[in-house]
Image: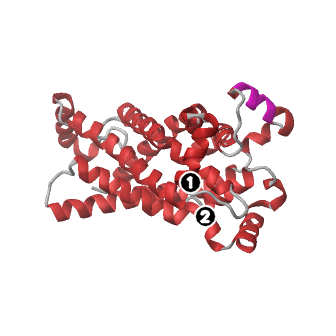
Amino acid sequence: ADDGRTFLAPLERLKLEYTVRGEQRSLFVVAKSIATTQGLTGFWKGNLLNVLRTAPFKAVNFCAYDTYRKQLLRIAGNQEATNFERFVAGAAAGITATVLCLPLDTIRTKLVARGGETLGGIAGAFRYMIQNEGLFSLYKGLVPSIASMALSGAVFYGVYDILKSSYLHTPEGLKRLKDMKQQGQEINALDRLELGPIRTLMYGAVAGACTEVATYPFEVVRRQLQMQMGKNKLNALAMGFNIIERGGIPALYAGLLPSLLQVLPSASISYFVYECMKIVLKVE
């Protein structure tokens, strides 16, 4: 899904303008302003770091989810995971990936913020943060990150698995599974997708949209926490109230539209690749 990330980088860039820089203007005006002041390449600012951050994050997340789900199945002795087990495995996978990958996200926020250009890229920002703010500064916003990723993992995997399971228990789904069993190895990888290509993409998009809406306020709070300088720093809860005080509830959803436009194809592709890789690698 990294090619997808690069292709959708302008939407990510626009989202950061709202969440990091507190942009108030309309989407069209902001896009025009970036194009005028920084040229088209301005839309891809920080993209390399985003790809470096997202690739291991996605890999750890999917891998952890499968591992946790199998462990829960083994403990419970079930044939199929319950909705509760799916949510728990998803939440645990989200937390695991966050703890391992948050420093890259903090560095990226620093680079995109005002004055980030002067830090000298990824290595420079890393050095600056360690020297001036200490090692733990790389984990700024860890509490909302963990809360967000626990909820995100639970919703992302839970919604997709519930949709998938519901479909596979319908007469049409049962017939599809039966036909696939009869054809065995003769059919190609795409036809071996239990949901079929279109449904896999569609359910992935629905899961992605539900996740984004549920967790977006956490992301806005986290970005603002990562931006804090000086002594009198707010905690996550105080920052949330501070954002609402300044701009009301809508302020917690600043930049949601470009984020949703980016997430829908990204979530679809992620699940599509995930399901295809399970077939190719013969993972149960």
Please indicate, yes or no, whether residue 1 appears anywhere in the rendered image.
Answer: no
The CA distance from mark 2 to mark 1 is 12 Å
Look at label 2 and name its amino acid.
Pro
Task: Tell me which numbered mark, 2 or 1, is placed earlier along the sequence.
Answer: 1
Please indicate, yes or no, whether residue 237 appears anywhere in the rendered image.
Answer: yes
Q: Is 236 left or right of 111, judged from the image as shown?
A: left
The residue wearing badge 2 is: 103
Please tell me how crowded label 2 is: few (under 14), some (14-19), or many (20+) other residues with Cα within 10 Å: some
* Label placed on residue 54: 1
- Residue contact at pointers 2 and 1, CB within 8 angstroms: no
* Label placed on residue 268: none
Q: x, y (%) of residue 252? A: 56, 39
Please tell me how crowded label 1 is: few (under 14), some (14-19), or many (20+) other residues with Cα within 10 Å: some
Q: x, y (%) of residue 115? A: 81, 53
Q: x, y (%) of residue 232? A: 68, 61
Residue 38 versus residue 50 in the image, above or below? above
Query: Residue shown at 72%/25% (left/top)?
Result: 28
Magenta-drawn segment: 28-34
Viewer-proximal residue among 102 and 24: 24
Viewer-proximal residue among 248 and 159: 248
Query: Residue shown at 41%/35% (left/top)?
Result: 201
* Residue 204 lies in the magenta-colored region: no
Locate the C terminus by quadrant.
bottom left
- Quadrant in which residue 40 is drawn: top right
